[in-house]
Image (cartoon, helix red, strand yellow):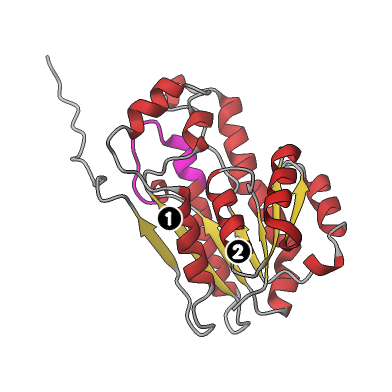
Amino acid sequence: MTGTLFITGATAGFGQATARLFCQNGWKVVGTGRRRERLDAMKAELGDNFHGASFDVTDEDAMNAAIDALPQGFRDITLLVNNAGLALGTAPAPQTKLSDWKTMVDTNITAVLSLTDRLLPELIERRGMIINLCSIASTWPYPGGNVYGGTKAFLRQFSLGLRSDLHGKGVRVTSIEPGMCESEFTLVRTGGDQQAYDALYKGAHAIQPEDIANTIHWVATQPRHLNFNSIEMMPVSQSWGGWQVARDSS
């Protein structure tokens, strides 16, 4: 089973690994990202099955222009993977910046809505598929997760709502919700703090981008009568902690 994949955030991490795997398995892939030089390098590596479209997902006009300019061989999109997203900061809510909150909402929610709205008619026409990259933070809160967790909870619920609204149209929708993953995501979140990155992942055997790519590919290539509503996944090393209790010392 092959088709044409449109994936955001293809210049690193999950997106890059997914674009590479799908191309290697005979799919046409439209990979998007802000870093044109990385998209050019992927084109050189992956060849004619890959088309890079450079734009910021929060720029709706640029997104529409890139879709309008897709080459003929990449227009019949059958799978949308909303992968691009970010977290900014790890501080508790009283210590965060409102601008960071708004950036997370613009990237993780508004951009996903804009792209999904744009491609939904043709995905319905082709009885295609939508895979949204969420997070265990969509279900399980943690200190410092605040708005990031809220955006992923929105995306998880949006995925379920799409499934309901697309009833009878043959379009599959899946929310993939990973736990601790090793990628540039953490460097972005910590403002490029390599020491914090190394400390977080040391000895943890975290999920790797290739693990997510394999999961996306598996979901996308299952028989068309099957839909996986959500997949929550963690490394074996990660599990839940106890409840917090604030105690009065007076």
Of mark 1 and mark 2, the one earlier in the sequence is 2
- Residue 129 lies, in percent from the top left, at 60, 71
- Residue 78 lies, in percent from the top left, at 68, 72
| Number of other residues with Cα within 10 Å of mark 1, as a class: few under 14, some 14 to 19, many 20 or more | some
Residue lying at 76% horizontally and 72% vertically, measured from the top left: 76
Residue lying at 50% horizontally and 63% vertically, measured from the top left: 216
- Residue 93 lies, in percent from the top left, at 43, 27
- In the rendered structure, which amino acid carries the disc numbered 1? Asp
- Residue 28 lies, in percent from the top left, at 70, 66
| Number of other residues with Cα within 10 Å of mark 2, as a class: few under 14, some 14 to 19, many 20 or more | few
Q: Which mark is residue 211?
A: 1
Q: Is residue 148 magenta?
A: yes
Q: Report the magenta residues as a range.
A: 139-151
- In the rendered structure, which amino acid carries the disc numbered 2? Gln
Residue 97 vertical position relative to residue 41 in the rendered view, above or below: above
Q: Which mark is residue 24?
A: 2
